[in-house]
């Protein structure tokens, strides 16, 4: 794999762009209301939205770096040469299954989002406190928490980022995904 994997990063950005309708429908209200709470009485709500979204994209990047770092470490320790290939295959299968979910309301992947909901239940109090803050640090914390929302689209992008096996590439993959969702 190249140091600069432009085809992968372009695909991640396109996945974010094509999935942004899903993002808007599923999280737009939550993001908008939390952003509105922190922008109440302020003269520049656009700045609040920019700060939140930059932090959200940064949070995606951090998760991508962590996932790729773990896979890279396991790959090095176990000498599993095909780990990235298998993870990309898993990503392709996940995309197909997500398509079934959206086309036919198939609920076969709900167990993954339920597992993510357990993690989110521990993160959400932090996100709520951060969303209530009126400063940049609150929006930064809220954006960083956002990557932990249970979302099959984010999980699929994370699988792709993990498949790189390199933290920097995993980070950049998820940043491009996040940029696409903007």
Image (tube, rainbow, N blue to C red):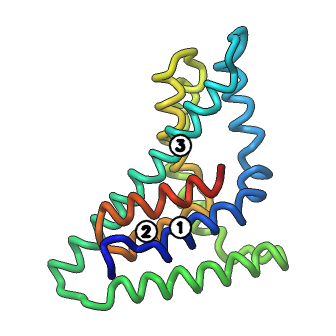
Is the residue under label 1 in contact with that under label 2 (CB below 8 Å)?
Answer: yes
Q: Mark 2, residues whose alpha carbon is within 10 Å: few (<14), some, or many (≥20)? A: many
According to the picture, the residue beneath numbered tag 3 turns out to be 56
Gap in Å between the C-alphas at discs 3 and 2?
16 Å
Please report whichever mark, 3 or 2, sits nearer to the chain's N-terminal start. Answer: 3
Q: Nearer the viewer, residue 13 or 158?
A: 13
Residue 177, picture quadrant: bottom right
Q: Name the secondary structure under disc 2.
A: helix
Residue 97, picture quadrant: bottom right
Q: Residue at x 67, y 29 (%)?
A: 34
Rendering coords of residue 161 (x, y %): 43, 68
Rendering coords of residue 165 (x, y %): 31, 73
Gap in Å between the C-alphas at discs 1 and 3?
14 Å
Determine if residue 156 is in view: no
Q: Is residue 98 above or below residue 120?
A: below
Q: Mark 1, residues whose alpha carbon is within 10 Å: few (<14), some, or many (≥20)? A: many
According to the picture, the residue beneath numbered tag 1 turns out to be 157
Residue 78, picture quadrant: bottom left
Rendering coords of residue 91 (x, y %): 53, 80
Residue located farthest toward the top when viewing the structure as drawn: 41
Q: Residue at x 43, y 53 (%)?
A: 61
In the visual, does 98 lie left or right of 141?
Answer: right
Gap in Å between the C-alphas at discs 2 and 1?
6 Å
Q: Residue at x 53, y 33 (%)?
A: 142
Q: Name the secondary structure under disc 3.
A: helix
Please report whichever mark, 1 or 3, sits nearer to the chain's N-terminal start. Answer: 3
Q: Is residue 87 above or below residue 158?
A: below
According to the picture, the residue beneath numbered tag 2 turns out to be 161
Q: Quadrant of the N terminus?
A: bottom left
């Amino acid at each position: 794999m190249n140091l600069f994997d432009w085809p992968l990063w372009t695909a991640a950005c396109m996945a974010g762009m094509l999935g942004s309708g899903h993002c808007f429908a599923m999280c737009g209200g939550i993001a908008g209301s939390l952003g509105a709470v922190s922008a109440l009485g302020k003269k520049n709500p656009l700045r609040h939205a920019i700060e939140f979204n930059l932090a959200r994209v940064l949070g995606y990047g951090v998760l991508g770096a962590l996932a790729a770092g773990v896979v890279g470490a396991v790959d090095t320790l176990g000498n599993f040469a095909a780990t990235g290939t298998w993870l990309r295959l898993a990503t392709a299968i996940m995309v197909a299954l997500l398509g079934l979910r959206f086309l036919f309301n198939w609920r076969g992947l709900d167990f993954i989002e339920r597992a993510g909901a357990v993690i989110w239940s521990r993160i959400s109090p932090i996100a709520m406190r951060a969303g209530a803050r009126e400063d940049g640090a609150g929006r930064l914390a809220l954006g960083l928490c956002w990557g932990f929302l249970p979302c099959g689209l984010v999980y699929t992008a994370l699988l792709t980022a993990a498949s790189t096996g390199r933290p920097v590439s995993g980070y950049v993959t998820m940043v491009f995904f996040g940029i696409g969702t903007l």
